[in-house]
Image (cartoon, coloured by chain):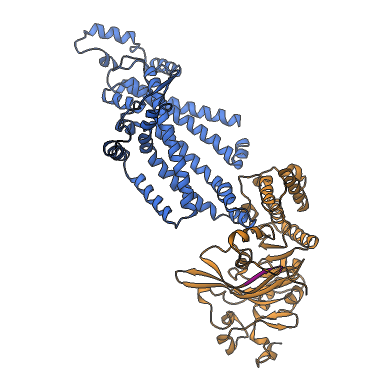
């Protein structure tokens, strides 16, 4: 198990190095960084001085090594537009995005699994057909449209929920949370649904298909022949066997939820990393874009590692194959 | 004869499909006594496994029991409400399936599966159930059961897994065990061990065993009586020695003729021409008539009912006293 984690960590470093090269390359190919800093009428000598002071006249590999060394320490330079360190900007925005992604995933897993199990067990019932229809909507409607429709219904017509922002937040050390205030919760509902709807329908469809598959297996038939209760068969034996593909999807989708919260955050003006990224793109704020790229890659790598470890917890057969690699 | 453990009376099972109703089991009757092993043989699709599933009440829709009765120690069980039938399953009837590799849930330890089953059917505490589980594993011949009990199914060999499956079927000391092709997926040497294990358990506990297989060798070794099934009906049923050595029904004759023998030198095994009809195209009269070498006019119109003939019961017009052809074959 330990060797497995080490092996995975080495692979992860490889991935991050590759992403590092790409994000570093952005600085060089998206125009001269010096031009982003100085104004139009800065004399050439001063430009050269800025260039030297930033180390931009060093050979490219040296610059890359320096960039990596700083990135490892969480240093991603200074934002062009905010004149603040990128790491501070991201740290400030991260809690908002993580809370949103976490709630959206929780919503997606909770409802997705419940609806999936139900429509797998009673696939001809009326409710199962309703769920199938909902999932069709969730899969085919684009995120921003769902967000706008929700805002129209619950904020404009009914006036129940706020249409933008996080509501009141409470600071716990450097983490600002909206989970401790009523207005924070209210503000979280619609963005979570908007962000999680696609994931929910995906999970529901996978759980349903897996349930149908598992219920046909011999061990379920044997469990019935042993007279186990229906509850034990469905939730103890069948559901657990559907978990491996569900964990894969949930894990990978959690990464996407964080990385692509951009649209939802834009629609709801949610002060998270996604909104920061959109603003960075509009203003060609490369340090932020590069740091965001690295951060998203890191999140994906960590989630993949967590998913692999979860597999072995769920399925004992994988434990042996990891202990003795073929 | 004392009251049989299992008594099946004129059982009918149908499958409702888009192309009409298919009769998978069409009026079969048989008894199994205490400690007796009834072998059920026949080609694929003859209705052997469906019979087993019908007895334990696990026919899945679109299949359904369309008629007849199933009595377990005199109590009718085919019309029990689902929840009561669930308590009969596993407690009074145990079932063993063909493939031990897929019969066990791969995600749970053997101990968890055994204890869950034991505690479903008895009032034993968790430690008591664990002790009983270890005893059961020892009884089915798993070496060092205290150590092996916490293994996962994939850590056992095929034969050992089938022993675990048998232990699971025995959890509540059922009166009847239905073994559906219990040895088909196993090596020949392991087959013999599993068969002798089943026989020993049946003898020691007085359990009645319904052994479904297409392997005549297994039947000849294990069964006390044998039922030969063809197209959802019992063609012939009788003591195993008689049926194997002196089959009456032309289909049974063909089946026995197809067993290779070590004693006599035969160049070619006898083969029954043709194949079993599909359920949607069972011919009128005797279902075997298109393939039967002794077929005569009556076979094509009238369905033969089982007739007692010495110790056998056989569904064939050849043995009907009123039929003029009876001496022709005998």
* Nearer to us in this view, A81 or B74: B74
**Going by the image, does B131 lie left or right of A128?**
right
Asked if A169 appears above or below A136 in the picture, the reply is above
Q: Residue at x 39, y 17 (%)?
A: A88
Give residue B44's quadrant in the image: bottom right
Residue B278 shows in this picture: no
Image: magenta residue range: B69-73
* Magenta run includes residue B71: yes
State the image coordinates of residue B151 (x, y, percent, origin top left).
68, 43
Of the 4 image quadrants, the one containing the C terminus of chain A is top right
Asked if A108 appears above or below A169 in the picture, the reply is below
Residue A266 shows in this picture: yes
Asked if B176 appears above or below B310 in the picture, the reply is above
> Chain B takes which shade in the image?
orange
> Chain A takes which shade in the image?
blue
Give residue A91's quadrant in the image: top left
State the image coordinates of residue A210 (x, y, percent, origin top left).
50, 49
Q: From the image, give the main secondary structure of the stretch colored magenta.
A: strand
Q: Residue at x 63, y 63 (%)?
A: B56
* Nearer to us in this view, B36 or A39: B36
* Magenta run includes residue A265: no
State the image coordinates of residue B99 (x, y, percent, origin top left).
63, 56
Of the 4 image quadrants, the one containing the N terminus of chain A is top right
């Amino acid at each position: 198990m330990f060797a497995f984690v080490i092996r995975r960590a080495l692979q992860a470093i490889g991935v991050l190095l590759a992403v590092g090269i790409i994000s570093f390359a952005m600085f060089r190919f998206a125009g001269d960084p010096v031009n982003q800093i100085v104004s139009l009428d800065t004399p050439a000598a001063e430009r050269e001085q800025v260039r030297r002071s930033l180390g931009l006249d060093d050979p490219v590999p040296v610059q890359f090594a320096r960039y990596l060394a700083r990135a490892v320490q969480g240093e991603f330079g200074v934002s062009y537009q905010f004149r603040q360190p990128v790491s501070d900007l991201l740290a400030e925005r991260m809690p908002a995005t993580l809370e949103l992604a976490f709630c959206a995933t929780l919503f997606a897993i909770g409802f997705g699994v419940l609806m999936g199990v139900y429509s797998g067990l009673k696939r001809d019932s009326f409710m199962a057909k309703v769920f199938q229809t909902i999932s069709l909507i969730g899969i085919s409607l684009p995120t921003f449209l769902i967000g706008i429709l929700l805002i129209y219904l619950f904020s404009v017509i009914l006036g129940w929920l706020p249409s933008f922002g996080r509501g009141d937040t409470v600071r716990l050390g450097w983490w600002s949370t909206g989970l401790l205030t009523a207005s924070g919760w209210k503000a979280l509902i619609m963005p979570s649904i908007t962000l999680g709807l696609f994931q929910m329908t995906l999970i529901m469809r996978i759980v349903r298909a897996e349930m149908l598959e598992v219920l046909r297996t011999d061990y379920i038939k044997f469990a019935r022949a042993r007279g186990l209760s229906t509850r034990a068969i469905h939730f103890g034996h069948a559901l657990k066997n559907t978990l491996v593909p569900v964990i894969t999807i949930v894990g990978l989708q959690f990464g996407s939820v964080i990385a692509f919260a951009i649209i939802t955050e834009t629609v709801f003006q949610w002060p998270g990393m996604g909104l920061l990224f959109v603003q960075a793109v509009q203003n060609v704020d490369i340090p932020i874009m590069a740091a965001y790229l690295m951060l998203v890659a890191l999140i994906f790598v960590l989630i993949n590692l967590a998913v692999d470890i979860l597999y072995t917890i769920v399925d004992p057969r994988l434990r042996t194959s990891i202990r003795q690699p073929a | 004869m004392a009251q049989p453990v299992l008594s099946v009376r004129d059982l009918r099972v149908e499958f409702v499909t888009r192309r009409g109703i298919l009769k998978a089991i069409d009026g079969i009757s048989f008894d199994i006594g205490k400690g007796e092993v009834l072998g059920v043989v026949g080609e694929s699709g003859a209705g052997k496994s469906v019979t087993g599933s019908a007895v334990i009440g696990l026919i899945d829709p679109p299949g359904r029991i369309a008629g007849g009765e199933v009595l377990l120690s005199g109590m009718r069980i085919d019309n029990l409400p689902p929840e009561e039938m669930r308590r009969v399953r596993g407690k009074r009837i145990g079932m063993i399936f063909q493939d031990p590799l897929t019969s066990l849930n791969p995600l749970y330890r053997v101990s968890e599966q055994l204890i869950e089953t034991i505690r479903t059917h008895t009032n034993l505490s968790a430690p008591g159930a664990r002790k009983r589980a270890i005893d059961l594993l020892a009884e089915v011949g798993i070496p060092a059961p205290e150590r092996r009990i916490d293994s996962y199914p994939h850590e056992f060999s095929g034969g050992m897994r089938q022993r675990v499956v048998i232990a699971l079927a025995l959890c509540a000391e059922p009166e009847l065990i239905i073994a559906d092709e219990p040895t088909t997926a196993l090596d020949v040497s392991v087959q013999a061990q599993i068969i002798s294990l089943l026989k020993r358990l049946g003898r020691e506990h007085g359990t009645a065993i319904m052994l479904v297989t297409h392997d005549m060798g297994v039947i000849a070794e294990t069964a006390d009586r044998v039922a030969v099934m063809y197209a959802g009906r019992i063609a012939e049923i009788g003591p195993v020695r008689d049926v194997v050595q002196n089959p009456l029904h032309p289909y049974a004759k063909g089946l026995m003729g197809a067993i290779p023998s070590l004693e006599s030198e035969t160049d070619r095994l006898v083969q029954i021409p043709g194949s079993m009809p599909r359920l949607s195209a069972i011919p009128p009269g005797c279902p075997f008539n298109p393939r039967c070498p002794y077929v005569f006019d009556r076979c094509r119109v009238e369905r033969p009912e089982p007739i007692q003939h010495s110790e056998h019961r056989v569904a064939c017009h050849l043995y009907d006293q009123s039929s003029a052809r009876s001496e022709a074959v005998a």
